[in-house]
Image (tube, rainbow, N blue to C red):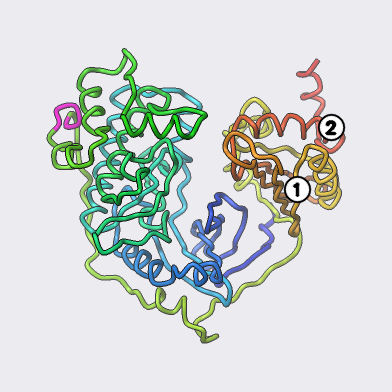
Amino acid sequence: MNRTKIKHRVGKYEVGRTIGEGTFAKVKFARNSETGESVAIKILDKDKVLKHKMAEQIKREIATMKLIRHPHVVQLYEVMGSKTKIFIVLEFITGGELFDKIVNHGRMREEEARKYFQQLINTVDYCHSRGVYHRDLKPENLLLDASGDLKVSDFGLSALSQQVRDDGLLHTTCGTPNYVAPEVLNDQGYDGATADLWSCGVILFVLLAGYLPFDDSNLMNLYNKISAAKFTCPPWISFGAMKLITRILDPNPTTRITVPEILEDEWFKKDYRPPVFDEIEDANLDDVEAVFRDSEEYHVTEKREEKPTSMNAFELISMSQGLNLGNLFDEQGFKRETRFTSKCPANEIISKIEEAAKPLGFDVHKKNYKMRLQNLKAGRKGNLNVSTEVFQVAPSLHMVEVRKAKGDTLEFHKFYKNLSTCLDKVVWTTEQDMEEKK
């Protein structure tokens, strides 16, 4: 088996595929070349950070995160800086998103939902006690480790530009609308702790019901439903769980249930076992200061190779549903991303995708063997953005990842169906696939 070819190196880390994207940052898979450990690297643009006067806020957030060592929070290992970028090295979580578990299997049994909710509340309580608030809690930010336990990502790093005013309250409206507390929407200032708890209540409802308590295609109608806490629990949710959800989804933050009260709730307490772990009293924060220094001696080196990233067998299997590689390319299995294989040269694949995307109304941005496709016409959740990347699996075989970066998932599904029709001659179809289609 051939060793993976390095496309991008940051210091001692070999950087690979993109695994997440946000407004201010991009997250990539990487491997520590000294230890072989897999990590995730969050990459921020230094010019954007300085332009939005976020430097001090980021320093404070990162320094706090380095002190947090909780079993259910994604660990922050170190921070590095180059002339143009900030690199935050994080624990790599292999179990996927809790969101995918709901999408693939529907609502959870109360025992399973309670376990995740207990882990979430324990994490939120711990971080709040250290002055760290998430402000964007949702199933997509809740990951699962190899043991199936919760790992909260982006705690303290999800809303880097927020500021606290003299009244001690936050005033930036942020987060995913369906999970945002009423007081965040009315722009009167809010407490980060009670706002996080509201999001936890929405998450518990989703785990038990399989759908959102507040949802509407019209944003103003959605805000009105949230402000009035207008929702109905389905009949299969037990009275105990229903009572707890109602106390959390209280539109008045001053009467909303608190964490100590949740910990005493009868439904919550069943089989509750808080994790036992050693707290870190001190941490080396030298790298946090060094990130923003202009001196070259503090900058990490970056090296790039402009060719498709090679992928070994283990990486290929890790991206599939299991050892059966047929699952990897099964069109029925994709949600917000999908993949296909091609025997065409990488440059030809890129050209064909561009030719197919432009007539569908997409603006195309190319960089090496990655593409960003943006729909010029806004959809239900804004402009649909699609990211694609070509990986080399073998000398004459490439795998293409097509992923929704922004916008509505159903619109992405429709786009991919149209795209795959146009790429009929590019996608490699095996004889077995041909037989199955007959």
Q: Residue at x 52, y 58 (%)?
A: 24
Give the vertical position of 151 relative to 368 (above or below): above
Q: Quadrant of residue 260?
A: top left
Please state if 399 lies on the left or on the right of 384 as rendered.
right
Residue corresponding to mark 1? 363
x 28%, y 50%: residue: 190
| Residue count near mark 1 (Cα–Cα under 10 Å), binned few <14, some 14–19, many ≥20 | some
Asked if the stretch drawn in magenta spans residue 267, the answer is yes
Residue 105 drawn at (x, y percent): 47, 24
Q: Please give the name of the residue rendered at 38% of the width and 57% of the height, measured from the top-left corner.
A: 75
Mark closest to the chain's N terminus, 2 or 1: 1
Tell me what residue is drawn at x 81 percent, y 35 percent: 428
**Which residues fall within the magenta stretch?**
265-269
Which numbered mark, 2 or 1, is in the foreground of this view? 1
Q: Please tell me in which quadrant of the rendered image residue 244 appears.
A: top left
Quarter where residue 59 is shown? bottom left
Nearest the eye: 193 or 270: 193
CB of mark 2 within 8 Å of CB of mark 1? no
Q: Amino acid at mark 2?
A: Asp
Q: Is residue 373 left or right of residue 234?
A: right
Foreground: 42 or 133? 133
Disc 2 versus disc 1: distance between alpha carbons?
A: 21 Å
Quickly name the residue at label 2: 424
Q: Residue furthest top?
A: 235
Under circle 2, the secondary element is loop
Q: Quadrant of the C terminus?
A: top right
Q: Is residue 429 magenta?
A: no
Question: Looking at the image, is 22 positioned above or below residue 260?
Answer: below
Image coordinates of residue 285 in percent, x first then y, are 35, 74
Q: Main secondary structure of the magenta part?
A: helix
- Kindly identify the amino acid type of the residue bearing the numbered disc 1: Asp
The image's mark for residue 124 is none
